[in-house]
Every structure is written in C-alpha cells, then in structure tokens.
Amino acid sequence: MSTLFIVATPIGNLDDFSYRSVQTLKSVDYIGVEDTRISRRLLEHYNIDKELFTFHQHNEHRKVQHLINILNANQSVALISDAGMPGISDPGFLAVREAHKQGHRVSVVPGPDAATTAIVASGLPCDRYIYEGFLPPKKGRQKRIKLFIDEERTVVLFESPHRLLKLIDELNKHLNQQRMMAIGRELTKKFEEVIRGSVAEVSDIVRRREEIKGEHVIVLAGCDYQD
C-alpha cells in the first residue's frame, strides 16, 4: 500500500508553508502540480527537487490513472495546487477517491486556506458557514444567488477580478442592501485588504476603484445577522 499525500500550499505568503509540508514533499517520489512554473517557485524556495507531473482541471480525468500507476508501483505521490488545499475549488477530489478505491493510503497535510482566512478576517459569524466556491458563470448562477436570500449561515464565495462587479450587482439586486458582507483581497500578500460593510457600502467602495486586481473571497453574513 502506497500513500497519496494531499499538501496545502501558501495562498500568497511563501513563509506560511509548514515544516511538515516541506518534509513531506522532500520524502515523496513524485509531485503532481497544477502549473509547473508556479510550483517551481515554491519548491525552489524550500530546496525541494522532485520529478513533477501536471495535474490540473483540464487533464485531471486522464492523469488520475497515471497517479494510480505510481501508487501501484509502491511509490509515493504528493498532490499540490497553485495555492491552498487541493480538492477545494482545485483538482484533487478524483485522485483521492480513486486512491481510496484502489486501497492506498491518503494523508492530508493541512495548511493555508483562503476560505477560512477570509471568514475569520471578516469579523462576521464563523460558527456556522457554507462554502459555495465559484458560482457558475452563466447557467444556474441566479438560482444559486437567490438561495442566499433566506440563508441564515454565513456564505463564502470565490470570485475572479473581472467578474467581481457582476457579482456585486447581483447581490445588490437580490439581497437586502443592508446585509453585511466583506471582501478579502490578496490575502496573506503584501497588498492584503479586507473591505467590510453592508452590501450597499461595499458596492460603493468597489465601484470607486479605478481597477480591480487580485483574487477575491466574498463573505456574506446570514440573513438574520445584525452587526
């Protein structure tokens, strides 16, 4: 029985990589990565020199068997994403599922996570929350957003910079504009920022920006929350 290691990587600050994560990557035979260019910066920073293979959303179904073949040959594999935990809005689920089915061991090395980092930084309730990840760009998007109207738990969303204004407009349209929310931008990086306020206030702040850069985590308070 071989081991598939799922290793969380920094979401921006390389110093957030744990000692256990470094030692794990140094011990395995192969490392599956989303983008070799991005992963090499992290691996070189920690003097990790291993054979890499790509494992991303466009080849995940095809590369699962390659990963299993390595495990079946009694060699170990680590899977990392460009940032954060593999399997959470990143490839990983299929590999973990198949490794279990084939009788191999799966070991998760925890670490940085954009969702929990943002919800704690938001100052909004984090005792009960739901993670929605990226909303569909078109089909089913409005239906998902309307579900937030009566949602009592805090909602965590991811959004790209070029669709952030669209999401803000949709929240303004469907939700109470006094509903509290926060946006975490460039978390753990040099220009980290948390914008907090009502849906209307945050919308006004974002719309005054000359340009919108960086990945964003949106934290939306439950419908009954009063600040």
Image (cartoon, rainbow, N blue to C red):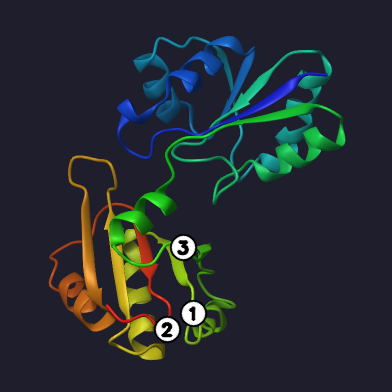
Q: Point out residue 109 in the picture as x, y percentages from the top left corner.
A: 56, 30
What is the three-letter code of the residue carrying label 3?
Asp
Query: Disc 1 marks which residue?
Result: 152
Q: Say which element carries label 2.
A: loop
Q: Earlier in the sequence, mark 3 or mark 1?
A: 3
Q: CA distance from mark 2 to mark 1?
A: 5 Å
From what the image shows, is residue 39 above or below residue 56?
A: above
User: Nearer the viewer's eye, disc 3 or disc 1?
Assistant: 3
Residue at 44% in and 64% down: 157
Q: Return the mark for residue 127.
A: 3
What is the three-letter code of the residue carrying label 2?
Cys
Q: Where the N terminus falls, by quadrant?
A: top right
Q: Quadrant of residue 164?
A: bottom left
Q: Are marks 3 and 1 in contact (CB under 8 Å)?
A: no
Q: Where the C terminus falls, by quadrant?
A: bottom left
From what the image shows, is residue 211 above or below residue 137?
A: above
Using the image as rendered, state which of residue 77 and residue 39 is in the foreground: 77
Q: Are marks 3 and 2 in contact (CB under 8 Å)?
A: no
Q: Say which element carries label 1.
A: loop
